C-alpha cells in the first residue's frame, strides 16, 4: 500500500458533498491475475453527480458494476444507502432496487414492448397492479419524450430512443442512485444529444448519478465532481472547473491533452 | 419530373435456356447428363404410380393402415377424435391469429390475416395426403370406412367454425387458448375414455385457468388474494374430479391403438411430455447446485450416447426392474416412456444452446432492476432462448415422429408394421411390396413436411415481433 504523495485536492475531493449515499472503501477487484480495481476509495453524496473518465481498460465500468454487484469485488467494503454489499442475495437485491443502471448497449428486452419493458420490474418486484404500473410508465415515457412509442418493440426504435426507454425502465423502480455505463458510446452522433438532455434533466431533478462517459461537455456542465481513473486506480478527483483547467497529475494532463 | 427507369431487357426463352442450362461448357455437360436421367426416372415413376402399380393393396386395407387392429365397432371414437381435433385446430389457429393482430396493432404494424385457405396451402403436403386417402377410399369397393368425405368435410367445417375465434375481443383471448386445450384433452379422451381415473389432465388445465383468472381485486391483502386463487383452483379440480367420477365411461386405452393413429398419438404424447422434461434438464444442467448439475449432465450424456432402439428394448425388458413390483406396464406405455426419456435429453441440449446464445446483457439488465433469478429466467431468458431454438426443436420432434417406426421392431403395430398385416393376407402375399412401402413413406413425409413448414413460418413470425 503506497499512499505517499496524496495531494490536498485528492484528499478533499474523495469526501462527498454532504451526507454520503455510496461509500467505497479500499475496494479491490481481480479478473484472474489482472487487477482491475486497486484500492478504490470514493464517496458519493446525495443528489451529487459524479462523472468518471479515463482511458479504456482503466476500470471505470468495473467500478460502477461493482456498486450493484454485477461484478463481485474481492476486497474492501461497498455501502449503498446504509446497506453493505455482502454475499447475501437479499442484500444484493435490496441494493439493486435502490440503484438503476443504464448500459452502453441499452439491453432492452427485445421480446417485450416498450411499456412491458418498463413495467416488468415494478410489477414483478414491487407487485404494482397493471394499471398503476402502466400509468407510471407512461409518465416516465413523457418525461423522456417518447410516449407515442409505448406499444412498439425495441427493435422498431432508433438507438437514442432505445436508450431513453432504458433510462425510463430504470427510473420505474424509483431508484435513489442511477449508474450510467457509457450511455452514449453506442449511439450515432446525432442521437447523443437527446440522451444527454434526458440525463441533464435527471441531474437537475436532484438524482444521484455516477456516470462513466467520454462526453466531456456533460462532465464540464453537469458534474459536481470528476473522477479520473487509470490502470484501476483513482488518479485524480476534483470539481470540473478545477479538473479541466488545472489538473495536478501528469497522467491526467496526458489524458486530457489526448482527448481535448 | 419522371425518374429515369432502368432499361428493360426481356429475355427470350432461348436466352433463358442458354443462361440457365448452358452457361458454360460444364453446366452444358451437367444438363446433357441430368436431363435424360431425370426424364427417364420421371417416366418410370409415372409408370409405377399410374399404370403398373397394384394399389389395391393399399385401397382395400386403407382402414387397416389408418387404425390398424383398433376395434372396428369402436371406430366412431376415432371419427369423433378427428372432428374434435379439427375444431381444436381451428380455435387454436384463430386465437393465435387474433393475438398476432393485437400485437401488430399495438406496435403500429400492418397485419395481414392469413385465411384458412392460406393455412391449407401452407400445409399442402397434408392436404395432398388426405386427398390421396379420399381417392383410395372412393375406389374401395368394400367400403368399410364410415363415409370418409363426410369426416373430412366435418373436420374442415369445424376448424373453420373454430377459426372464428379470431373475432374474440382481446380480453377473451385467453378463453380461446383454454378452449383449445380443453378440446385437445376431450379429443384425446373420446378415444381413451372418460373413466374415473382420467381426471388429471383436464383438472390441471382448468385448475390453473381458475387460479389465473379468478377476480381478486376486492380483497385487500396479498395473502387473501393468494388464498382465494388457490381455493378457486382446488374448486375447479374438485368439480372436474366429481364429473369424471359420475361419467366414468371407459374407452379404448392406448394399449389397443395401432396404425397411423398410434404413430401420430405416441409421437404427440412423447413430444408433449419430453418438452417440459427437457426444459427442466437444461435448467438443472445450468444450476449452481453441483449435485443437480452432475445428475442432469450424466443423464443427458448417457441417453445421448445410446441409440433409441436400445432404449426401446431396455424399456421392454429392464423397465420392469425399476418400477414397484406388481405395476403392470403395457408395451406401448414402455415405448412412450423410452421415446420421452430419449427426446428429453436432446431437447435439453437444444434448450441449453438457446440459453447460451443469449447475450449476457439481458440477464444483467434483469439483475440491475432487482428481479429475482427465477423471474429473470421465466420472463427474460427463456422466452428469448426458446424462440431462438424453434427450428432445432421442431427438427428433433420430426425425427422423433419418424423414429416411432422403430416400435415395429419391438412388436408394436404402428403405421409401418401394418404392412406385415397386409402382406399376410392371401391376396397380397409377396405382391405390391413397393406400393405399400411408398404409401407409408408418403404418409410419413406428409406430416413431417407440414411440421417443418409450420416451424419455418413460426420462426419468421416471431422474428418480426422483435
Image (cartoon, coloured by chain):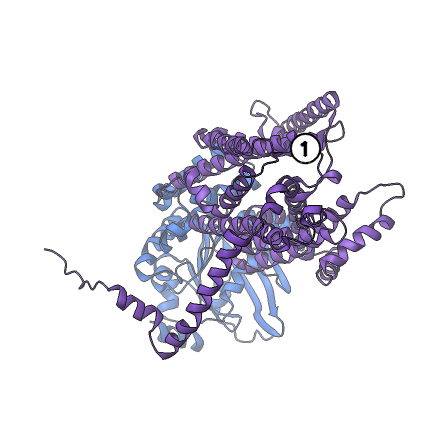
Quick check: A239 above or below B268? below
x and y, in percent, of residue B227 in the image: 67, 27
Which image quarter holds the N terminus of chain B?
bottom left
The blue chain is A
Residue at the spot 45% in from the left edge and 30% down from the top edge: B164
- Front one among A247 and A9: A247
Q: Is residue A81 visible in this depiction of the protein?
A: no
Q: Colour of chain B?
A: purple
| Residue B347 placement, left or right of B252 | left
Residue furthest to the top in view is B246
Residue at the spot 56% in from the left edge and 38% down from the top edge: B137
Q: Is residue B54 visible in this depiction of the protein?
A: yes
- Front one among B273 and B358: B273
Q: Quadrant of residue B217?
A: top right
Residue furthest to the bottom in view is B25
Residue at the spot 53% in from the left edge and 70% down from the top edge: A233
x and y, in percent, of residue B179 in the image: 56, 30
x and y, in percent, of residue B171 in the image: 48, 29
Q: Quadrant of residue B249?
A: top right
Q: Mark 1: which secondary structure?
A: helix
Instruction: Please report, as a chain letter, where disc 1 is located.
Output: B
Quick check: B430 above or below B193? below
| Residue A146 placement, left or right of B344 | left
Residue furthest to the right in view is B325
Q: Find disc 1 in the rendering and name its residue.
A: B191
| Residue A75 placement, left or right of B97 | right
Q: Mark 1: few, some, or many residues within 10 Å (few <14, many ≥20)?
A: many
x and y, in percent, of residue B440 in the image: 61, 50
| Residue B344 placement, left or right of B461 | right
Amino acid at each position: 500500500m503506497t499512499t505517499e504523495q496524496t495531494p490536498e485536492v485528492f484528499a478533499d475531493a474523495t469526501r462527498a458533498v454532504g451526507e454520503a449515499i455510496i461509500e467505497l472503501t479500499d475496494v479491490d477487484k481481480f479478473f484472474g491475475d489482472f487487477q482491475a480495481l486497486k484500492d478504490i476509495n470514493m464517496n458519493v453524496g446525495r443528489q451529487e453527480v459524479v462523472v468518471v473518465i479515463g482511458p479504456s481498460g482503466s476500470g471505470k465500468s468495473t467500478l460502477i458494476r461493482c456498486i450493484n454487484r454485477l461484478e463481485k469485488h474481492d476486497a474492501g467494503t461497498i455501502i449503498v444507502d446504509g446497506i453493505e454489499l455482502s454475499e447475501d442475495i437479499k442484500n444484493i437485491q435490496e441494493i439493486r432496487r435502490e440503484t438503476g443502471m443504464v448500459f452502453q448497449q441499452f439491453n432492452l428486452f427485445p421480446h417485450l414492448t416498450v411499456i412491458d419493458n418498463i413495467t416488468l420490474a415494478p410489477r414483478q418486484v414491487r407487485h404494482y397492479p397493471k394499471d398503476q404500473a402502466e400509468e407510471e410508465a407512461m409518465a416516465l415515457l413523457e418525461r423522456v419524450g417518447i410516449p407515442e412509442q409505448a406499444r412498439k418493440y425495441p427493435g422498431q426504435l432508433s438507438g437514442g430512443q432505445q436508450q431513453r426507454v432504458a433510462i425510463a425502465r430504470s427510473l420505474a423502480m424509483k431508484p435513489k442512485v442511477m449508474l450510467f455505463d457509457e450511455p452514449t458510446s453506442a449511439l450515432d452522433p446525432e442521437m447523443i444529444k437527446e440522451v444527454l438532455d434526458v440525463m441533464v434533466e435527471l441531474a437537475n431533478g436532484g438524482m444521484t448519478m455516477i456516470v462513466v462517459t467520454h462526453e466531456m461537455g456533460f462532465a464540464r456542465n453537469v458534474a459536481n465532481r470528476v473522477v479520473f481513473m487509470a490502470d484501476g486506480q483513482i488518479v485524480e478527483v476534483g470539481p470540473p472547473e478545477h479538473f479541466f483547467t488545472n489538473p495536478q497529475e501528469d497522467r491526467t494532463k496526458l489524458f486530457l491533452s489526448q482527448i481535448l | 419530373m419522371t425518374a429515369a427507369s432502368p432499361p428493360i431487357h426481356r429475355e427470350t426463352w432461348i436466352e433463358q435456356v442458354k443462361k440457365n442450362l448452358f452457361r458454360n461448357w460444364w453446366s452444358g455437360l451437367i444438363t446433357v447428363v441430368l436431363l435424360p436421367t431425370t426424364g427417364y426416372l420421371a417416366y418410370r415413376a409415372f409408370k409405377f404410380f399410374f399404370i403398373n402399380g397394384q394399389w389395391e393393396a393399399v385401397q382395400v386395407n386403407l382402414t387397416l393402415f389408418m387404425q390398424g387392429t383398433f376395434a372396428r365397432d369402436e371406430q366412431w371414437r376415432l371419427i369423433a377424435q378427428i372432428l374434435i381435433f379439427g375444431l381444436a385446430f381451428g380455435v387454436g389457429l384463430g386465437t393465435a391469429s387474433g393475438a398476432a393482430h393485437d400485437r401488430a396493432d399495438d406496435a403500429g404494424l400492418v397485419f395481414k390475416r392469413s385465411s384458412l385457405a392460406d393455412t391449407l396451402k401452407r400445409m399442402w403436403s397434408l392436404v395432398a395426403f388426405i386427398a390421396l386417402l379420399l381417392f383410395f377410399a372412393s375406389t374401395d369397393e368394400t367400403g368399410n370406412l364410415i363415409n370418409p368425405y363426410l369426416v373430412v368435410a366435418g373436420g374442415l367445417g369445424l376448424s373453420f367454425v373454430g377459426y372464428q375465434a379470431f373475432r374474440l375481443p382481446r380480453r377473451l383471448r385467453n378463453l380461446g387458448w383454454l378452449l383449445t386445450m380443453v378440446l385437445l384433452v376431450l379429443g384425446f379422451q373420446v378415444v381413451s375414455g372418460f373413466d374415473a381415473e382420467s381426471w388429471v389432465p383436464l383438472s390441471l388445465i382448468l385448475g390453473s385457468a381458475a387460479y389465473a383468472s379468478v377476480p381478486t381485486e376486492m380483497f385487500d391483502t396479498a395473502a387473501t388474494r393468494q388464498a382465494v386463487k388457490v381455493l378457486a383452483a382446488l374448486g375447479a379440480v374438485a368439480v372436474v374430479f366429481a364429473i369424471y367420477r359420475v361419467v366414468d365411461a371407459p374407452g379404448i386405452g392406448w394399449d389397443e391403438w395401432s396404425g397411423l393413429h398410434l404413430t401420430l398419438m405416441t409421437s404427440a404424447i412423447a413430444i408433449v411430455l419430453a418438452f417440459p422434461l427437457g426444459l427442466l434438464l437444461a435448467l438443472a444442467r445450468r444450476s449452481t447446485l453441483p449435485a443437480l448439475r452432475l445428475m442432469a449432465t450424466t443423464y443427458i450424456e448417457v441417453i445421448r450416447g445410446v441409440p433409441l432402439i436400445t432404449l426401446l428394448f431396455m424399456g421392454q425388458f429392464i423397465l420392469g426392474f425399476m418400477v414397484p413390483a406388481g405395476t403392470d406396464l403395457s408395451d406401448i406405455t414402455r415405448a412412450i416412456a423410452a421415446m420421452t426419456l430419449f427426446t428429453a435429453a436432446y431437447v435439453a441440449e437444444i434448450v441449453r444452446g438457446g440459453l447460451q446464445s443469449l447475450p449476457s446483457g439481458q440477464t444483467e439488465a434483469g439483475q440491475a432492476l432487482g428481479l429475482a433469478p427465477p423471474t429473470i429466467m421465466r420472463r427474460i431468458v427463456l422466452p428469448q432462448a426458446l424462440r431462438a431454438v424453434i427450428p432445432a426443436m421442431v427438427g428433433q420432434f420430426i425425427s422423433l415422429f419418424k423414429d416411432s417406426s422403430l416400435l415395429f421392431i419391438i412388436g408394436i403395430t404402428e403405421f409401418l408394421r401394418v404392412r406385415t398385416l397386409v402382406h399376410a393376407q392371401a391376396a397380397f402375399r409377396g405382391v405390391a411390396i413397393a406400393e405399400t412401402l411408398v404409401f407409408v413413406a408418403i404418409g410419413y413425409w406428409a406430416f413431417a413436411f407440414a411440421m417443418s413448414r409450420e416451424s419455418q413460418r413460426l420462426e419468421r413470425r416471431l422474428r418480426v415481433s422483435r
